[in-house]
Amino acid sequence: MRNKSSSVYRWNNMDYDILVKIFMSLNVMDLISVVSQVCSSWRSACCDPILWKKLDLCIQISDSCIYAPLQSDAWSYSVSNNNRLMNILKTTSNLSQGNVTRLIFNFFEYVEDEHLVYAAKRNRNLKRLALPIWSRLTVRGRRKAFKYWKGLESLTIPDFKSPMKLMKATGTNCKNFSELKLTCNLNLDYALLLSMCRSLRCSVFGPQ
């Protein structure tokens, strides 16, 4: 019993910098679902800003395992999926304490207005944002979210409806915006958009 207690004591009192260095090798789901729950000292280390420069949600959690969806039908919209994503955003926001500068949503996750607006309110220092191919985002929701991202520099987007309205909201609120990446077919709307945004660095990743 004494040896067990001594071992627990040593784990609880590991050097802060050592803990942070170890935690840097873990993914976000490890941090929020396991490591931050161990003890107060580990949770404190989980809040170190260096761990939260990039919030990559490509790793998601299911009821029984951690995995990353690799195809478009891996996730389908449901209330449970909606709540799960919101819980992940809330937990990561509590740990990151506004230090996230790069947010990457899972490419095949369903994102709604409430998710994007919440992420915007809690991560106002964002510089780079990658949105998923599947979403239920409205023009109003996107406008509301982008009002909080004054320092946004780079945006990766799929085939949204009304891309001109999105770019107008981005240009109005994000004065440092300089890079646009498209993960979709280059249709007429986006071709027109690119022709009007010649000052931006633009890339297209998708079937032509």
Image (cartoon, grey):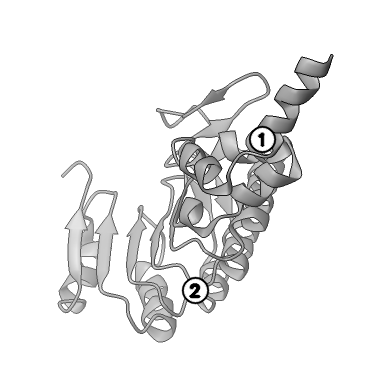
Q: Secondary structure at mark 1?
A: helix
Nearer to the camera, 93 or 189: 93
Sort mark 1 into few (<14), some (14-19) or many (20+) by Cα contacts within 10 Å.
Answer: few
Q: Nearer the viewer, mark 2 or mark 1?
A: 1
Q: Looking at the image, which residue is at 36% across and 81% down?
A: 171
Q: CA distance from mark 2 to mark 1?
A: 29 Å
- Left or right: 152 with respect to 73? left
Which residue is denoted by mark 2 in the rendering? 146
Q: Looking at the image, which residue is at 66% across and 42% down?
A: 42
| 101 lies above or below 205 | below
Q: Amino acid at mark 2?
A: Phe
Q: Looking at the image, which residue is at 41% across and 71% down?
A: 166
Q: Position of residue 172 (x, y in %)?
A: 41, 85
- Quarter holding residue 65: top right
Q: Which of marks 1 and 2 precedes in the sequence?
A: 1
**Which part of the image, by quadrant, shows the N terminus?**
top right
Looking at the rendered structure, which numbered label has been put on residue 33? 1
Nearer to the camera, 37 or 28: 37
**Which part of the image, by quadrant, shows the C terminus?**
top left
Q: Position of residue 126 (x, y in %)?
A: 45, 67
- Left or right: 191 with respect to 24? left
Q: Position of residue 165 (x, y in %)?
A: 41, 75
Q: Amino acid at mark 1?
A: Ser
Residue 76 visible to the viewer: no
- Left or right: 155 with respect to 119? left
Sort mark 2 into few (<14), some (14-19) or many (20+) by Cα contacts within 10 Å.
Answer: many
